[in-house]
Amino acid sequence: MTPPLAERLRPATLDELFGQEHLTGHGSILRTAIENGKIPSMILWGPPGVGKTTIANIIAHTLGVPFFTLSAISSGVKDVREVIEEAKTRERCILFIDEIHRFNKGQQDALLGAVEKGIVTLIGATTENPSFEVNSALLSRCQVYVLKPLSEEQLIQLLHHALQKDDALRSRQIELKETDALINISGGDARVLLNLLELVADSLGDKGVITDQKVVAIAQKRVALYDKKGEQHYDIISAFIKSIRGSDPNAAVYWMARMIEGGEDVKFIARRLVILASEDIGNANPTALVMANACFDAVNKIGYPEANIILSQCATYLAASPKSNAAVVAIGDAMAAVRRFGDLPVPMHIRNAPTKLMKNMDYGKGYQYSHSYDNNFSLQEYLPEKLSGTKFYDPGKNPREEELRKFLRQLWKEKYGY
């Protein structure tokens, strides 16, 4: 099978690399380290498609050392340990981990000893700020190099380079008339840019002109279905959330699978489940929030691929739970009241009175300690006078919250209209 254009044109030397002159140009810090054969463990931080994987490959090729590669999306602690054991039998090895920010703490900790002892030279690639996503112990053992987005001029140069240098493209009569659509749709990602160029060129056959209109037409049919910065990204998240809200576990796991296959951050998915547990379920099933929070903690410890199972369990449980948005409505109405009426005074009897002066000013005077009364309840005012009797929380129409409504009605009688 013929590899895609981006792979066929992957630079083999630093001189062939587009962009990143601040790191790889003559006299630059990283190039000097490579030429001296003394590279540190490092984190390459930058947007997608700017050369992180390419630089790792060039380093390994230039130094002529064994090169192991793992993807944090599909690899676990077991895979890391297997590579480290293999590296112990070699003299000098490079371990490249793509999307290292997706490794959880346990997976990152598994690397520490091998990096510290020099068993492997680690090269991690990440699109996220390593200060937040890579644990401090591992980060302190690595040099962080920041890769810059490719400029529009560099991207255009790359397109012309592809048409001139790739054997499959230069044998055809392909004219590159317009480039705006190619650059805009690729979002500055050189890999996406080249593969989109190939899709469009293939649609033209042996002869044709590449225009913005042609690129858009082809892209709508063929470009990736899950772009983390594009419209599809937000559409699929929306479908996922609405499927759970609509109590359809089947649709929920399908849209979640689309996110996982698209490389979505496990914490992003888990975070949405925690929010949804309160936003769309709330007191209709209080266990939902407990479950979602446990899911968030668990996937941080486990990571992909096993985190898929935990996410699936949580998503299907939330989808199959009774629904209520009463908590959302309550806080929304309360905040609207705050904005409308401003800083209303706290009733004197429920003010804090830590000093004698405050007590002399009647702070806390008349407060009835609830636990001193029958049913641990005393009928007294807790809202500012201007909002007395205002109902913000209206329990949802589900078995659990109907019980809460009945309980509140018994306590407050007609005050809040429960």
Image (spheres, rainbow, N blue to C red):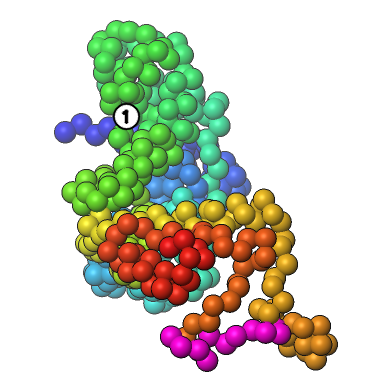
> In front: 88, or 396?
396
Residue range (magenta): 364-375
Q: Nearer the viewer, residue 228 or 358?
A: 358
Residue shown at the point (43%, 23%) measured from the top left:
182
Residue at x 18% of width, y 49% of height = 250
Seen from the viewer's position, the closer of residues 255 and 374 is: 374
Does the rendering let one see residue 347? Answer: yes
Q: Secondary structure at mark 1?
A: loop
Q: In the image, is residue 386 above or below residue 48?
A: below
Residue 371 colored magenta?
yes
Residue 371 in the image: x percent, y percent? 50, 89
Task: Place residue 281 in its image quadrant.
Answer: bottom left
101 or 301: nearer the eye? 301
Where is residue 347, by image quadrant? Answer: bottom right
Whether residue 370 is situated above or below residue 177 in the rendered picture: below
Q: Quadrant of the C terminus?
A: bottom left
The amino acid sitting under disc 1 is: Val
Q: Which residue is mark 1?
A: 223
Q: Residues within 10 Å of mark 1 (few under 14, many from 20)?
A: some
Give how far across and how far down residue 170 sits, in percent.
33, 17
Question: How far across and how far down the image is residue 142, in percent?
Answer: 50, 65
Extreme residue in the front direction: 414
Q: Please name the residue shown 20% across and 31% down the image.
A: 2
| Quarter in which the N terminus is drawn | top left
Residue 32: x and y, percent?
Answer: 55, 53
Does residue 261 appear in this view?
A: no
Magenta segment includes 156: no
Give the residue displayed 31% in from the left and 50% down from the top: 245
